[in-house]
């Protein structure tokens, strides 16, 4: 007569599953708390300030209104803890960030206007946990926001120079965007800020 050790098998199964769930629970808890070691990254993105209208010049300087807007950015962010400043290869973006860079004593990192993917990769790796300021263009500013995980925004109208996007990338990797208007209103109305998940 064969006896099956059913109670012993059942006990062994219960122990194995209990250990499995304990290990699984420990992994989940560890993963949750590991996210707290990831720093929060803040990326401030603006279009360059107003430029001189020179139809035959592909790289014009800022106009007096643009220079005033650049000074406003330096006033606004001079004490905001900016750690890195990026601008494209064009004079209008370089001149937009120059007053802020001078005030903070930071060098401006020049980026190719057409290499958004490389810029975002650099921010995620080199500037993780920092506050970064970027001057781009009416088409690249929304592109950068999207590449950072902040959702899609339309190209900024040619007449608007007062748009600002503040992208906060949380420890979980999730990003939120605050879109605001700053300085002297330009283009179609002043508008107000909106928070997008």
Image (cartoon, rainbow, N blue to C red):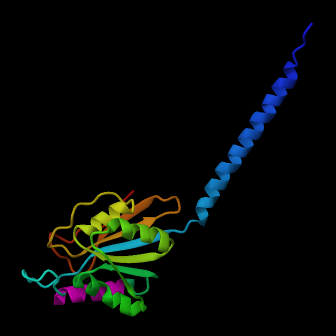
* Res 114 quadrant in image: bottom left
Question: Where is 2 relative to 26, above or below?
Answer: above
Question: Where is 3 relative to 26, above or below?
Answer: above
Type of secondary structure dominating the magenta stretch: helix
Residue name at image x 23 percent, y 60 percent: 154
Could you say where residue 37 lies in the image, as x and y percent from the top left?
60, 66
Q: Is residue 192 left or right of residue 149?
A: left
Q: Is residue 194 something one can see in this rendering?
A: no
Residue 5 among those drawn in magenta: no
Question: Magenta segment range?
Answer: 62-76
Farthest residue toward the top? Answer: 1
Could you say where residue 125 lies in the image, as x and y percent from the top left?
48, 69
Question: Where is 85 relative to 20, above or below?
Answer: below
Residue name at image x 31 percent, y 69 percent: 115
Residue name at image x 69 percent, y 46 percent: 25
Q: Nearer the viewer, residue 47 or 75?
A: 47
Question: Where is 148 relative to 106, above or below?
Answer: above
Q: Is residue 1 left or right of residue 190?
A: right
Could you say where residue 7 lies in the image, as x and y percent from the top left?
86, 22
* Res 109 quadrant in image: bottom left
């Amino acid at each position: 007569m064969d006896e099956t050790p059913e109670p012993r098998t059942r006990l062994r199964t219960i122990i194995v599953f209990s250990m499995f769930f304990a290990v699984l629970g420990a992994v989940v808890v560890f993963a949750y708390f590991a996210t707290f070691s990831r720093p929060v990254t803040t990326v401030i993105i603006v279009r360059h300030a107003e430029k001189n209208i020179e139809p035959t010049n592909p790289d014009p300087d800022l106009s007096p209104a643009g220079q005033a807007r650049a000074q406003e950015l330096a006033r606004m962010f001079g004490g905001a803890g900016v750690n890195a400043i990026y601008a494209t290869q064009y004079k209008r973006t370089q001149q937009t960030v120059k007053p802020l860079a001078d005030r903070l004593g930071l060098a401006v990192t020049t980026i190719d206007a057409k290499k958004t993917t490389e810029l975002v990769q650099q921010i995620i790796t080199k500037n993780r946990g920092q506050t970064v300021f970027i001057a781009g263009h009416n088409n690249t500013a929304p592109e950068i926001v999207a590449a950072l995980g902040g959702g899609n925004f339309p190209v900024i109208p040619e007449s608007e120079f007062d748009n600002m996007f503040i992208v906060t990338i949380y420890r979980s990797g999730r990003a939120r965007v605050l879109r605001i208007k700053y300085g002297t209103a330009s283009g179609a109305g002043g508008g107000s800020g909106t928070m997008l998940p």
